[in-house]
Image (tube, rainbow, N blue to C red):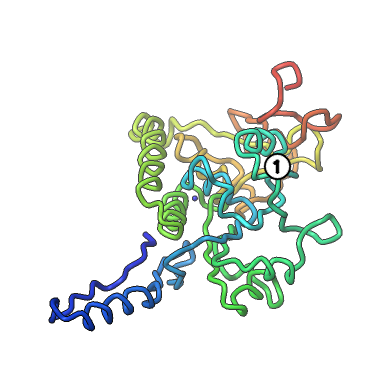
Amino acid sequence: MFPVHTHTAAFRPLLRGAAICAAFSSALWMSAPAQAATVTDVSGRSVAVPAKVERIVVGFGVFPAFAAVEGADAAKRVVALGADLKDRTPALYTALQARQPALGKIPFLGAEDKGGLSVEQVLALRPDVAIFGGGGPVSAKPGSLQARLEQAGVAVVYVDFRSHPTSNTVPSIRTIAKLIGREQAGEDFVRYHEEQMRRVTDVVAGLPSAQKPRLFMDMRAGGVKECCGTPGIGNYGDFIVAAGAVNVGAELHRNVLGSAKPEAIAAARPQIYVAGGASAAGSAVGVQLGDGITPEQA
């Protein structure tokens, strides 16, 4: 879940003893504009961004990774935030807000009829850059927030922690880190992430194909929607494969996320069934798991 530094050319006057040259040098130093930097986002685009980034729009699915790189004051530079943090993970949002009260003052992106900012309101916040999930500009339809921001001269950068997390998390983190001038923090996170992944992948690296268990993941267990939502090529499917299992969902559809009928699941003969939670605390529908859910509720 990508260094931005202010580069000012050193001006060394040839006539150090001349007061007028010294004064001229000082004037140049003070007036030279901050040079732009370039970052490469997960879509492969090279994007010119301001050397000093102070006002950031953080889109859906991005803030947890952004916060991991930005650190304890993650809310300080954010002027607008994807509403998914509050709506889909309320316990996480509450926990983060307790540690960073400024988070509660940031307006949300989202549907206007649900209190989300309009495109005009986002532009009025004068963002320097905007970071969006989704993997690339293919999702930016004409008239969309992403497209309007770019038309207004705002640098728009894409990252991906959802569609293909095992391949895109590290470059996305590095993109964010370079964008906000926190490269060392980004590398610290990358090192930790890769260490944790190797704790699993090193163990299963030599596992013969015939010994890999067949695993089906039900991402909406318990009747939240019609059975059964499951990852295919990507999303949690990446982690299933990295853990040394066969992802049955990828045999039933070839999308990042999709669905499968109970009959097709049974015919695929999974050996392991993993249930995912998709309900907030207190819901009468679906399996409840994750932040804010007690063992009794689960």
Q: Who's the residue at 20% across and 79% down the image?
A: 19
| Nearer-the-camera pick, 2 or 43 | 2
Query: Mark 1 — residue?
Result: 264
| Nearer-the-camera pick, 40 or 164 | 40
Viewed as shown, does residue 149 lie left or right of 187? right
Mark 1 lies on a secondary structure that is: helix
| Nearer-the-camera pick, 189 or 218 | 189
In the picture shown, does residue 104 fall above or below 18? above
Q: Who's the residue at 46% across and 70% down the image?
A: 49
Q: Percent from the top left, x then y, of residue 89?
A: 69, 39
For the view shown, which residue lies furthest in the front direction? 19
Q: Amino acid at mark 1?
A: Ala
Looking at the rendering, in which quadrant would you find the C terminus?
top right
Q: Percent from the top left, x then y, of residue 41?
A: 46, 64
For the view shown, which residue lies furthest in the top direction? 296
Q: Quadrant of residue 262?
A: top right
Viewed as shown, does residue 166 lie left or right of 226? left
Q: Quadrant of residue 92?
A: top right
In the picture shown, does residue 42 fall above or below 63? below
Q: Residues within 10 Å of mark 1 (few under 14, many from 20)?
A: few
In the picture shown, does residue 27 fall above or below 256? below
Q: Percent from the top left, x then y, of residue 74?
A: 54, 46
Q: Who's the residue at 62% across and 68% down the image?
A: 126
Q: Who's the residue at 53% across and 44% down the image?
A: 73
Q: Percent from the top left, x then y, of residue 137?
A: 57, 70
Viewed as shown, does residue 55 lie left or right of 118? left
